[in-house]
Amino acid sequence: MEITRVTLENFLKKWDGDPLLNKITNTEAEYKKGQGVTFKVDAPNADILMNTQGGVFRSGDQGMMDTFYTPEIISLQQQRLLDAIIKFVTDFYSYIPNLEGNEDFRVIFEVKDSELKKNGKVIPPSPKASERAYLITAKWNMKDLKDLKTGKLGAVQFAEKITVEKD
């Protein structure tokens, strides 16, 4: 499980597909008998960077975050996270722990704004920050993973077996 956790975290941090609109900061793993394995990925919203006359504009302007993270951008962000996890599982399925056929393999992305500090003090979040904070879960049954490993399912068929939950 630890090998999978480290490989997943590194894979997401070095993701070379369509850019994730997240920073990957931490990954934790937990196994519960009869339920399966869950990987929780802290994936804060990416800071908005832009060139300005004085240099680089960085986080701290909550108005920029509010303007950038529209429902369309959040939907794109969610799709890119799902695309990345599908690619991880289809490429690295041999790293996934062997579980019982009735157990699940889950990856939960926790997305929210990073805590911002200015002059050592925490800046209160924007009132709109809660609109771009969510959990998205990608889940497969272990039977589907075993079918992928044995070739009964191809990568495309396996990707269609995903269950996605959004909170």
Image (cartoon, rainbow, N blue to C red):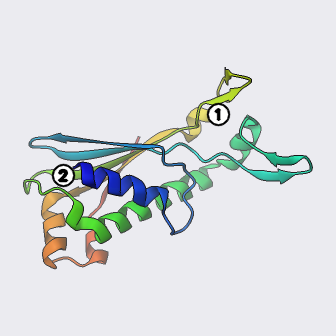
| One can see residue 82 in this view | no
Rendered image: mark on residue 21: none
Kindly check if marks 2 and 1 are in contact, taking CB atoms under 8 A apart as contact.
no
* 124 with respect to 15 (left or right): right
| One can see residue 36 in this view | yes
Q: Residue at x 57, y 63 (%)?
A: 19
Q: Quadrant of residue 148?
A: bottom left
Q: Residue at x 54, y 48 (%)?
A: 23
> According to the image, label 1 marks what residue?
128
**SS at mark 1?**
loop
Q: Position of residue 164 (x, y in %)?
A: 34, 54
Q: Amino acid at mark 1?
A: Lys
Mark 2–mark 1 distance (CA, rounded to whole Å) = 34 Å
Q: Decide which of 25, 86 is in the foreground and name it.
A: 25
Q: How many marks?
A: 2
In this picture, is 32 found above or below 49? above
In this picture, is 17 found above or below 51? below
Rendered image: mark on residue 104: 2
- Of labels 2 and 1, earlier in sequence is 2
> Which-is-in-front pick, marks 2 and 1?
2
Q: Residue at x 71, y 39 (%)?
A: 59
Q: Position of residue 52 (x, y in %)?
A: 87, 50
Q: Position of residue 69 (x, y in %)?
A: 64, 47
Q: Quadrant of the C terminus?
A: top left
Q: Decide which of 4, 111 is in the foreground and name it.
A: 4
In this picture, is 97 found above or below 38? below
* 147 with respect to 89 (left or right): left
* 82 with respect to 5 (left or right): right
Q: Amino acid at mark 2?
A: Asp
